[in-house]
Amino acid sequence: MHIAVIGTGNIGRTLGEALAAAGHDVRYGSRTPEESVREALDGAEAVIVGIPGDAVDGVVADLLYSADESDRKTVERLVRDIGLNPVYLGPGRHDLLDQLLHLWFTLVNTQGRGRHLAFKVL
């Protein structure tokens, strides 16, 4: 499976390396020109946005993802295994993930929070 991992820090890189070791084609996307988010998303069958799970004390961070319905149970198990709450956006919703990632980077860069910013679906 072709998986786009958005985020190249500890979480994104760790998830990507584990998925690659399991035989998946993993492409990374970040804010650097060398690892374009758009290029990583091109042809992706699943998208993982790697954010720190402990960004908010006492609150489990949500990991929003898009994948084929047939892959949903597997992806949700993997997400829960790393201590995050999976939030399914539906198949082919990479466009929405791209917009959320842009919002995240904008907030991080303008508010000086570094990687300590996560989204929580209420």
Image: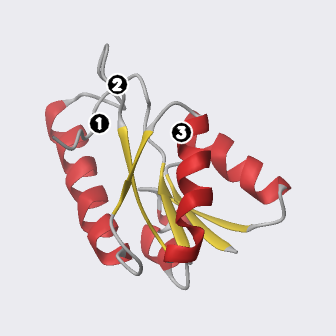
Mark sitting earlier along the chain (1/3): 3
**Placement of the C terminus among the 4 image quadrants:** top left
Please tell me which of labels 1 and 2 falls first in the chain: 2
Q: Looking at the rendered structure, which numbered label has been put on residue 98?
A: none
Q: Which residue sits at x=75%, y=48%?
A: 18
Residues under labels 2 and 3: Cα distance? 16 Å
Mark before the other along the chain sequence, 2 or 3: 2
Left or right: residue 49 compared with residue 118: right
Q: Position of residue 117 (x, y in %)?
A: 28, 33
1 or 3: mark nearer the eye:
3
What's the amino acid at mark 2? Answer: Ala
In the rendered image, the vertical position of residue 77 relative to residue 88, given as above or below: above
Residues at circles 1 and 2 in contact by the CB criterion of under 8 Å? yes
Write down the residue under mark 2: 55
Q: How is the image coloured?
A: secondary structure
Question: Type of residue at label 3?
Answer: Arg
Q: Residues within 10 Å of mark 3 (few under 14, many from 20)?
A: few
Mark-to-mark CA distance, 1 and 3: 16 Å
Which one is closest to the eye, mark 2 or mark 3? 3
> What secondary structure is found at the residue carrying circle 1?
loop
Left or right relative to 106: residue 34: right
Residue 51, compared with residue 31, is above or below; it is above
Q: Position of residue 1 (x, y in %)?
A: 70, 75
Numbered disc 2: secondary structure? loop
Quarter where residue 82 is shown: top right
Q: Is residue 9 visible to the viewer in this orientation of the structure?
A: no
Secondary element under disc 3, as helix, strand or loop, is: helix
**Residue to which mark 3 is pinned:** 80
Task: Identify the residue under disc 1.
Answer: 118
In percent of width and height, residue 97 lies at: 33, 65
Q: Which is more toward the observer, 15 or 104?
A: 15
The location of residue 49, given as percent across then percent down, is 45, 53
